[in-house]
Amino acid sequence: MTDASQTAIPQSPIADPGQHRVLWTIAALTAAILIVPASWLAYGVFAVAAMLLVLYGSTCVLQGKVGTLLLFWVLISPLGYYFLSFPRERPFWTFDRGFILLLGVAACFAPGDTSLRMPDLLRRAGMVWSLFLFASGLSLMKISAGLPLLSGVRVWLDGFLLPALLAWSIISCVRVREQLRALHLLICLVVIGLAAIGLAEAITGQDILAIPGSGLYFAGLGETQLLRVNGPYSSNNSFGLIGLVLFCFLLFLRRTEMALPPWQRVLHWVGVGSALLVSLMPLFRSIFLTLLLIALLDIWFTRNLRKRIFRVVTLMLLVVIFLMGNAVLPDLYQERVSSGENVYARMAQQRQTLHLFFKDPLLGVGLNNFIAAVPRDTPYTGPYSGVDPLDAPHSNLGAILAETGILGFIPYVLANGLLVAAFWTARRQGSPSFVLAWKYFLYIFLSYWISGLSLTSGHYGDLNLWYLLTIAVLYKFGATDVSDDPGPTLRFRQESLL
């Protein structure tokens, strides 16, 4: 007799409801792909991706992940000006404004970085910059209502306020050593993309990602004319100077000697070459001079004799190649290098700037109101050696002096001086990290200011965001020790890699 407990009773299989749902979902997606028009399907995918992105971004904001949001901005920002501005003409909503707003909210939820106490000089620089913001805001009252006033408000917000908030957020909330590897990867991808856009514009002679008001500028004489590309930005000086700043910053990131895989080390040098190409494509004389000065400083900083000789020989070869440009592109060389009219025009411009400053030395003529305030039928447009002025400041210092007066000019200069003093004082402490940070801060500072003496580049928010982002990362890197900041293992080399 068989035990009932040992008898196997066959049971009929029970269908799993989850399997049916998966099958029905696959069938519905297949039918949608085959039936729904491709444009509708693309819009649907875009909507789903946007919803997921918004959900993830909201989570990062509520959790105070300022570093993650910063990396997102680094990747998206070059194309954000073209695709994420509304409306197209004179947008009131831009990607940068939305990003800084989210960053500020996230900073409120962030616990703060207790590994760094804000140094006195840096705090004073921020306070003095607040005085400049107040004075430049007062200067806007000198502008009558209309487009000049809106343009001045835009420069005040995008060019001066938002970059300062970005730098404060990085120094206060971001543990940069944890983000260096990802930051290096994303910046390499960004500069490679910028170089590709610039090359496409140079070849086609067209502004591929045209932003309203950007315009086209060419260099050269006669038939030899080249487009001075601006890439996805509103001006070619932003394009070139952002490339130069990121060129120096990538070299700094490699100097930290993160443990990079072989493919990322290759990507690094591709990124360095792309950043250098981006800086040179707009054909600014000031950028060429800045690169020459940085190369000479790097030779001076290099202690290894063999590497110093190699750099000297490389520099001499580059100078020879540059001088050979006269034989290859004589018209371009004459217009950009040997012509003296540009020098006379800028001399006349400085005299015009001083005349406009004395018209109202206290508050100036209003931020970003220089061109509208220059009466073209008065002595303000007097020539110098027969060459008329440019009727635009073409100098950061000149623009601030004429547009905001003494009340804006003094805190503007003082804040930049305190920034240099903060790096120099920290460098004297002898920390290897700050020695490295000081060197590349000097390179980036020169990259920004040498051109800023002949261009009004300091009014552009896109350039100022990158400039202060890199400076804030440099300072935070130098001010935090590896033992206090649990990022990747970092080592320091005494030789330069430039």
Image: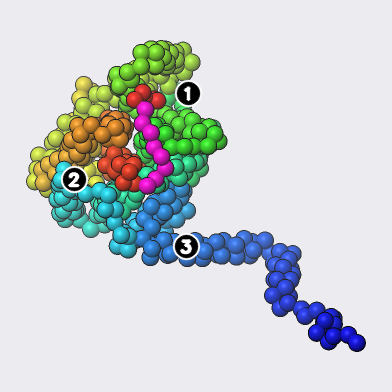
The quarter of the image holding the N terminus is bottom right
Q: Residue 383 carries which label?
A: none
Q: How far apart are marks 1 and 2 (CA)?
A: 53 Å
Q: Name which residue type carries label 1.
A: Thr
**Disc 2: which residue:** 119
Instruction: Determine the residue positioned at 51% across, 65% down.
Output: 51
Q: Give the range drawn in magenta.
A: 486-493
Q: Which mark is residue 224?
A: 1
Answer left or right for 302 relative to 398: right
Q: Where is residue 152 in the image (x, y as percent from the top left)?
A: 25, 51
- Sequence order check: which comes first, mark 2 or mark 3? 3
Instruction: Determine the residue positioned at 30% across, 62% down.
Output: 108
Q: Where is residue 81 in the image (x, y as percent from the top left)?
A: 42, 50
Answer left or right for 463 relative to 78: left
Residue, far right: 1
Q: Does the magenta stretch include residue 373?
A: no
- Sequence order check: which comes first, mark 1 or mark 2? 2
Secondary structure of the residue carrying numbered label 1: strand
**Disc 3: which residue:** 56
Q: Quick one: 320 or 51, which is closer to the camera?
A: 51
- Please rate how many residues cluster around mark 3, counting C-alpha atoms within 10 Å: few if below 14, some from 14 to 19, many from 20: few
Instruction: Determine the residue positioned at 18% across, 35% down.
Output: 425
Q: Do the residues labelled 1 and 3 touch (CB within 8 Å)?
A: no
Q: Name which residue type carries label 2.
A: Pro
Quadrant in the picture for residue 236 = top left
